[in-house]
Amino acid sequence: MTSDPMQQFQIKEKAQLFEIFGQSISWTNSAFWMVVAAVLIVGFFALTTKRKLVPGKMQSLGELSYEFIANMVKDTTGAEAMKFMPFVFTLFFFILAANLIGMNPYAFTTTSHLAVTAAMAIFTICVVIVAGIWKNGFKWFKIFAPSGLPLPMYAIIIPIEIISFISRPITLAVRLFANMVAGHVMLKLFAIFAAYLAAKGGIFALGAIVPVLGTMAIVALEFLIAGLQAFVFAILTCVYLNDVYHVDH
Amino acid sequence: MAADTDKTYGAAEQAASGGLPQLDLSTWFNQIFWLALVFAALYFVIATFILPRLREGISERGDRISDDLDQASNMQRQAEEAEKSYNQALADARAKAMSVAEETKKSVDAEIAAEVETADATAERQAEVAEANISAIKSKALANIDAIAEDTASEVFARLIGKAPSAAAVRSAMLN
């Protein structure tokens, strides 16, 4: 074991597969854990869709998940946005599964990589832009110019609106990435410190109890953050999807 | 350990241990490729199989519950109607019983009145007959008194004068 807290984020190539656009595609630990996340989600929901009249525990969980996301979309965006519900549902459960998988020792946290979170964030914003223009035509760009302001104000408001719009994918990506990295680094640092103290022996070994307790507290906190960040990503997606339907805000 | 034999992906990583592996751009394309693949597949499965089945399960239950509620309210309405008709029948029967009693009473009264009337009539007729008899007997008796008086007078005269006066003389004397 190395004592480098960043080592856990390293992407390891298991097999080189093929090339697209001059880029080689490899089977990596990141890819493996993404597939595990997807398989776990599908497996979980396969158990929940028995369609019994009186739902069992698993079916209740499935229906609870459905209604959780459905209400999130309806409450933040509106009933007309329900066609985006599968997207929000997939986002939420993929991020949640990836985050929770990352809580297991030896597992890799795919969402701790900026490439993954940025891709998801940029894709989300692209969905908003494409759906917005698809639905409203070029009137959609009015979201950058709220109506009913004195003319000189637009010189300030439009750049602000554009900057805030551009900052959305950035914050979306960085928030999830930074939360995951910070939690895992902290966990690792506490664990390394505990191991270091224990290895010293004597009175120091007794002192190792403090970072162990810290580790336990952080584990609990990280489980909370795993769910919370998935929720935040999903609900912000809904908030941004609001711009598709409500151009005049 | 397996991790040690695995080739570390990304050139920068091998050079600078301790840097952020996340900022090694050489791994980005690969990650995004797998993310797109996995996410698209997951989206497909969720959108075509999982969500419709969950939605159907929920809406089926909703339908069933609203059906059951409808049925329950129907039954309640029927029960209310049955109660109403029962009350109606009860009231009818009571009214009927009362009218029957009243009618019976009325007919009995009428019968009694009729009987009393006939009895009265009979009594009256009998009284009349009796009265007629009495007056007949009375007049007869009065007539008899005259005859007796005449007889007695002519007898008295016969005794007194030894000669019986004529009946006409006696009658005219009596009338004076």
Image (tube, coloured by chain):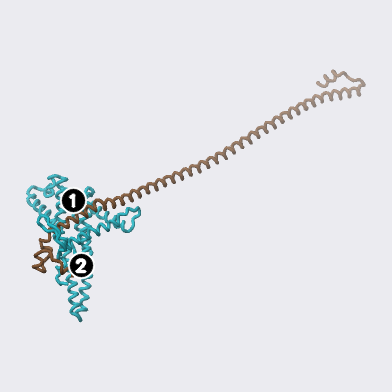
Chain colours: A cyan, B brown
Q: Secondary structure at mark 1?
A: helix
Q: Position of residue A68 (x, y in %)?
A: 26, 55
Q: Position of residue B146 (x, y in %)?
A: 82, 24
Q: Position of residue A106 (x, y in %)?
A: 20, 67
Viewer-closest of B68 and B11 = B11
Residue in the picture at 11% in, 50% down: A144
Residue in the picture at 55% in, 39% down: B99
Viewer-closest of A22 and A136 = A22
Q: Is residue B175 visible?
A: yes
Q: Position of residue A154 (x, y in %)?
A: 8, 49
Residue in the picture at 10% in, 67% down: B14
Q: Which mark is residue A106?
A: 2
| Picture quadrant of residue A213 | bottom left
Q: Nearer the viewer, mark 2 or mark 1?
A: 2
Residue in the picture at 46% in, 44% down: B82
Residue bearing mark 1: A242
Amino acid of disc 1: Asn
| Picture quadrant of residue B112 | top right
Q: B126 left or right of A207?
A: right
Does residue A186 lie above or below A91 as drawn? below
